Amino acid sequence: MGLLRFEIAMSLDGYVAGPNQTREEPLGEGGEGLHVWALELDAWRKRHGREGGETNPSSAVMEEGLARTGAHVMGRKMFGGGSGPWDEAEPWNGWWGEEPPFRKPVFVLTHHPRRPLELTGTTFTFVTDGIESALAQAQEAAGGKDVQISGGADVCNQYLAAGLVDELQINLAPVVLGDGERLFEGVGPDLKLEQLRAVEAPGVTHLTYRVA
Amino acid sequence: MGLLRFEIAMSLDGYVAGPNQTREEPLGEGGEGLHVWALELDAWRKRHGREGGETNPSSAVMEEGLARTGAHVMGRKMFGGGSGPWDEAEPWNGWWGEEPPFRKPVFVLTHHPRRPLELTGTTFTFVTDGIESALAQAQEAAGGKDVQISGGADVCNQYLAAGLVDELQINLAPVVLGDGERLFEGVGPDLKLEQLRAVEAPGVTHLTYRVA
C-alpha cells in the first residue's frame, strides 16, 4: 500500500490560503501569491492541458508527486460550491472545468450525500462517513500508489491530528499573508517530523518531511 | 553601511519560541527543538568556546552570518531578567555567562535605563528610546558590517513592520510547537520578499529572503 501524503503551498507565516475566501477568489486575499512559482512551470501547464513553460527544479518535484499519486482526498471547501446540501438543479462541479487536472479518483469529504460526478478523466466520489472511510476508499482506488490529500488546510490538519499522514511536502512561498487558513492549526507538538529533503527552486522551496 | 538582518530558528508552524517561557526554559516548552541542528555543529561549538563538532552545510551558513555581523540588537526579553526596572543589587547579566557568544557590541531594547554591561568580549548597551535609536547606535558600532537582530520574535516583528529589515534568514526546523511566539505576527501582507537562497542541511533548512 502506498503512503498518505500531501503537497501544499504555504506562506512563511504558515497560511495555505488567505482570508475572505470566496467563489471568485477561492484562495482568499493574497492566496494566489502562494502559487506564482507554479504557473509558468512546464509540469503545471502540462497537467492543466497547456503546452510550453519553464523547466526548473520544481518541474521534477511536481512530476514525481504526480507519478506516485494514485488517488486524491479533498475537503468540501476545496471542491467548492458553498456549504449545506448540494444543489441538484444547478450542481456545482468544482473549480476545474470539464477536464479537471487530477485524472485520478478523487474522494470529497462532505456532510451531504451526492452521487458520484464523472468528468473527463476524473471521477469525484462524495464521502459522508468521515476521514478514515475516505482514506480507505482512496487507498483501494490508488492501486498501491500513494493517496494525496489535496487540501484544504482543515482536511490536512484533521489527517495530521489523527496520526494518519505518512509524509508531507510543503511548497514554501516567499509571501506573508497575515491571516487566513493555517496548516498545523490544532495539530500541536505531538507531531514528530523528520526532514527528508529541501529543494531550492525559483520563488519556492520544496520541503519534504516524514512523520515519525 | 551594512544591512539590517536577522537569523532566527522557526518551527514549521511559525513559532520561534514555545509557550510558557521561564528563566529556566527561556525558549518555552519544546523550544529547544528549534536548535537541535545547531548544538553539535563545529561553528556553534566554536562560538560557545567548545572544541570539535560536526561539519555540515549549516557550518558555512553560520560562519558566514558571524563574519558579516558587526553589532547586535536584541529585546529585553531575550536578554532576560524579567520585566520592570533592573535590579541593581542583584543584576541580571544575561543567559550567557561571563563570556557571551556575541563578541560584538549588543544593544538591548528596554523601557528601563541601565548602565552598559561589559563582559569578556561583549558590551551590552541598554537603549530606552526605541528601535530606530537602537538601530542607529548599532549601525554606528558595526563599522560598515551588518546589524543583526538577535531576537526575540517581538523585536524582529517590530523592525519588519517598520520596514527597516533588509534581509532575513529563517532556520526552519522540522518541529511543530502548536503555541508560543510567532514570527511575522502583526506584520501583515505588505511585506514583500524575494527568496535568495535555500540551503538543505541535516535537521534544518536555511532560507534567506530579501525585503523588496
Image (cartoon, coloured by chain):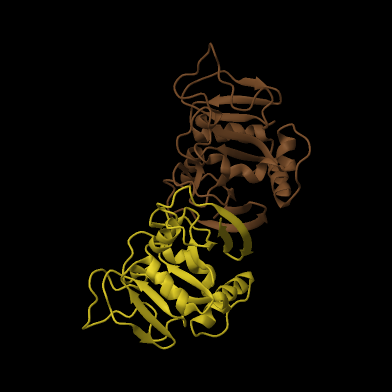
Chain colours: A brown, B yellow
Residue A138 position within the rendered picture, expressed as x and y whole percent measured from the top left: 61, 33
Considering every residue shown, the one lying at the far top of the view is A89
Residue A2, picture quadrant = top right
Considering every residue shown, the one lying at the far right of the view is A52
Relative side of B94 to B147, left or right:
left
Picture layout, residue B175 above or below residue B142: above
Residue A115 position within the rendered picture, expressed as x and y whole percent measured from the top left: 57, 18
Nearest the eye: A80 or B156: B156
How many marks are shown on the rendered structure?
0
**Residue B201 visible in the snapshot:** yes
Residue B150 position within the rendered picture, expressed as x and y whole percent measured from the top left: 44, 70
**Residue B40 visible in the snapshot:** no
Q: Which residue is drawn at 56% across and 73% down?
A: B65
Q: Which residue is drawn at 63% across and 27% down?
A: A96
Nearest the eye: A97 or B164: B164
Quarter containing the C terminus of chain A: bottom right
Residue A144 position within the rendered picture, expressed as x and y whole percent measured from the top left: 68, 39
Considering every residue shown, the one lying at the far left of the view is B89
Picture layout, residue B42 above or below residue A12: below
Picture layout, residue B198 above or below residue B60: above
Q: Residue at x 74, y 31 (%)?
A: A49
Nearest the eye: B107 or A69: B107
Picture layout, residue A11 above or below residue B156: above
Quarter containing the N terminus of chain A: top right
